[in-house]
Amino acid sequence: MRIQSIRDAKLIAKLNEPVQNLHYKLYPEKFKKFDYDEVCKYFDKIIDDKKNSFLVCFIENEPVGYIWFENIEKKETAFSNSSNYIYIQQVSVNKNQRGNGVGTYLFNEVLKFAEDNSIKRIGLDYWVKNTIAKHVYKKLGFELEKEITYFNI
């Protein structure tokens, strides 16, 4: 396995398909079906923003998954201290590579980035119905800190 930092919106859009389809399957009222052109346009708009990083995992030169993370810097307010942390926006691994350690390998690269940049926190969220994600993140050592609830009318 090899990890490479990528700023190619077309490749990221292609690798986004599994996670977008999963979100749509679990929450069709919230998420849209995967549309390569629309997703590509979105990534094209944000790909060069230096706060966003995209790492792609390759196996034998074949891209098999990616992780998108953002460096968040929040200023001190009357309510909270300043903070600098990594926020994982998305992780997607091709179906035929799941269970082979690709996600863990990608996460370890984010951890290395955080350590190299003296960043002490990494955050993420996942959808409640995505029990596989919950299991993976718990296994990696993430701890539940905040829950968000909604009331639908």
Image: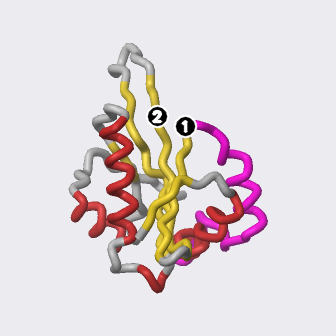
As rendered, which of 130 and 94 lies closer to the eye? 94
Q: Which mark is residue 72?
A: 2
- Secondary element at image label 1: loop
Instruction: Residue at 37%, 21% (x, y): give it.
Output: 82
- Secondary element at image label 2: strand
Which picture quadrant has residue 101?
Answer: bottom left
Q: Position of residue 88 (x, y in %)?
A: 44, 50
Which residues make up the magenta segment?
24-50
Quadrant containing the C terminus in the rendered view: bottom right
Q: Position of residue 126 (x, y in %)?
A: 40, 60
Q: Position of residue 55 (x, y in %)?
A: 50, 56
Q: Establish if 48 lies above or below 24.
A: above
Which picture quadrant has residue 32?
Answer: bottom right
As rendered, which of 130 and 122 lies closer to the eye? 122
Q: Residue furthest bottom?
A: 96
Instruction: Residue at 33%, 20% (x, y): give it.
Output: 81
Residue with the mark numbered 1: 51
For badge 1, the amino acid type reads Lys
Q: Residue furthest front?
A: 60
Instruction: Residue at 21%, 56% (x, y): give it.
Output: 141
As rendered, which of 59 and 142 lies closer to the eye? 59
For badge 2, the amino acid type reads Ile
